[in-house]
Image (tube, coloured by chain):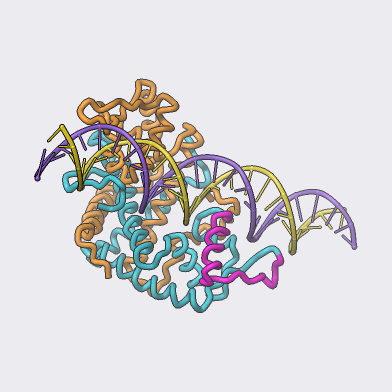
Chain colours: A cyan, B orange, C yellow, D purple
DNA sequence: TCCTAAAGCTTTAAATGTCAAGTAATTGGC
DNA sequence: GCCAATTACTTGACATTTAAAGCTTTAGGA
């Protein structure tokens, strides 16, 4: 099976995170556990393939993807916001990519405190190869869904994202 | 924003992981990034609330939830499969819960290699309190979705999960 | 009985992640 | 100009997770 040191046999195939919920739980809770389980399942597959086929990791791929979409470079802080991780984390990931010559830190001419991160030519080439493959993995994983279902799922998730974000400001904590 | 040391202002509210995709990317890829971003958003909120209100973590909560649904106890390996994490991980989580008296390791009478994990009375009480609150958080987060939408989303995710699982055996890696 | 293989759990190393503190540069009010 | 407050990044401490190696126990065959 996936990767645990203790492999699950076929009989366990349906016992996963969703088992945290029981039939008496609220529909929203069951849905959340299914969402979590599904996302984790796919994320694991992607991480493993990045590791196996490109000897890299998802956070490294993410940072390269952000830089690929920003040809003029991104400040560390911008990258950190877009990746939704802390600044200290980006420092480490950037260090490792820079060591391998995939990205470069360039002094921001307008702000002496800031660094701009930019893909090197080698990084760009490598990213394109990975992104191609990555897209194919995703298409395969979603293969059983038709265009209609993909559109519906995207729309529902957009609504959910809005619903979840709506609480961010007020923080109703009870 | 959640917790990064560099806070995102309101103007950045829409720049998140989804920005990894561009308009030319395949619909499945865009959907995947939205799925990932939405799940991460919700997961962060839940983690933070567990931390703030109960001084615990999601993996600890998960393990307690699994044990709550298995009154006779679970072997470490079973817990690890259900939580979809590695065995070594469960060892650490179980250690921390055991130190606090929330769970206990019991020698499996049938297999000298195995331990059975079981909630203590204190653990059971504490889990029930957390689970109540947890369910309310989730209901709030999903509040803007109607029953119909929740059912649709659940059905689509079930199809997606099946689609993603389908590849597990064969591992079409190219 | 004995020996090999496998299973269950723990331990360890490397990567990722947060947070807090520290350094350097910029901004804004006076 | 000057100085305080803010901002950008780095660093270090600590937590979590995986994969792999290690230890103990079980199972099965010679």
**Residue B117 covered by magenta stretch:** no
* Residue A58 position by quadrant: bottom left
* Range shown magenta: A87-112
Q: In percent of the image, x 34 and y 71: which residue is there?
A: A133
**Residue A100 covered by magenta stretch:** yes
Q: In percent of the image, x 63 and y 71: which residue is there?
A: A106
Q: From where the camera sits, is residue B166 visible?
A: yes
Q: Position of residue A140 (x, y in %)?
A: 26, 66
* Residue A153 position by quadrant: bottom left
With B145 as the anchor, is C15 left or right in this view? right
With B119 as the anchor, is A171 left or right in this view? right
In the rendered image, the vertical position of residue D18 relative to residue B136, given as above or below? below
Q: From where the camera sits, is residue B68 visible?
A: no
Q: Position of residue D11 (x, y in %)?
A: 64, 53
In this rendered view, identify the residue nearer to me: A96 or B43.
Answer: A96
Q: Position of residue A121 (x, y in %)?
A: 51, 79
- Where the C terminus of chain B falls, by quadrant? bottom left
Q: Position of residue A132 (x, y in %)?
A: 36, 73
């Amino acid at each position: 099976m996936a990767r645990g040191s203790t492999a699950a046999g076929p009989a366990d195939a349906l016992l996963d995170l969703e088992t945290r919920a029981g039939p008496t739980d609220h529909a929203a809770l069951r849905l959340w556990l299914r969402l979590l389980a599904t996302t984790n399942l796919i994320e694991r597959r992607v991480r493993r393939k990045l590791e196996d086929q490109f000897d890299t990791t998802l956070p490294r791929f993410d940072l390269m993807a952000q830089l690929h979409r920003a040809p003029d470079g991104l400040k560390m802080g911008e990258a950190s916001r877009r990746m939704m991780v802390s600044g200290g984390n980006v420092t480490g990931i950037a260090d490792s990519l820079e060591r391998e010559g995939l990205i470069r830190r360039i002094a921001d001419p307008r702000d002496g405190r800031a660094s701009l991160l930019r893909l090197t030519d080698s990084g760009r080439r490598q990213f394109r190869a990975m992104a191609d493959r990555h897209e194919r993995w995703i298409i395969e994983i979603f293969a059983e869904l038709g265009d209609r279902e993909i559109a519906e799922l995207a729309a529902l998730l957009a609504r959910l994202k809005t619903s979840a974000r709506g609480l961010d400001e007020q923080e109703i904590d009870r």
